[in-house]
Image (cartoon, rainbow, N blue to C red):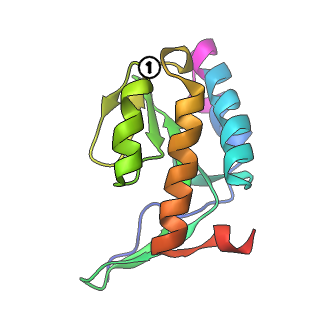
Amino acid sequence: MAKNKTAETEISVTDFINSYVDNDQKKADSFRLIELMSEWAGFEPKMWGPTIIGFGSYHYKYASGHEGDAPLIGFSPRKAEFSLYVYSPVEEQKEILDGLGKFKMGKACIYVKKLSDINIEILEKLCKSSIAYLNEHHECACREK
């Protein structure tokens, strides 16, 4: 069985942002996302793989037998835009996405250029809805809270 590439690491989140993010606005937005997601998830930020900042964790297992751990919610301050890992396939999220603002949708994440392009209250709803979904469908660290 292949090992999951995106695993929690001991790398400092602050050191990662300060060395990886070369744009002052993106750096400020990264630290703001850390404040918000820490509050919403109830977990401190941890690095997952080389570039993802995650909050909390859950264990997944697919019918194929592949299993692993992943952050409940998270983001990556990529060069072009932020990748927000806050989406779950529930009707509630589909309904509120229209109010999020300026974004692109990937298969499992939402892409935004900067925080000022989106509605933070809607982002909070997406994050909390994802955590609730993961808590209901997977072994989740959020149950311990």
Magenta residues span 19-26
Residue under circle 1?
113
Q: Residue furthest left?
A: 64
Residue 97: x %, y % from top left: 38, 33
- Seen in the picture, residue 84 relative to 43 is either above or below; the reply is above
Spot occupied by residue 101 in the image (x, y as percentages of width and height): 42, 20
> Could you tell me which residue is drawn at 69 percent across and 28 percent down?
32
x and y percentages locating residue 123 in the rendered image: 53, 34
Q: Is residue 143 above or below residue 96?
A: below
Q: Main secondary structure of the magenta part?
A: helix
Q: Is residue 4 a member of the stretch shown in magenta? A: no
Indicate whether 67 appears above or below 142: below
Q: Is residue 21 above or below residue 67?
A: above
Quarter the N terminus occupies: bottom left
Q: Secondary structure at mark 1?
A: loop
At x 70% / y 30%, what residue is drawn? 31
Residue 112 image-quadrant placement:
top left
Residue depicted at 74% across the width and 44% down the height: 39
Disc 1 residue crowd, few under 14, some 14–19, many 20+, Cα 10 Å = some
In this rendering, position of residue 109 left or right of residue 50: left
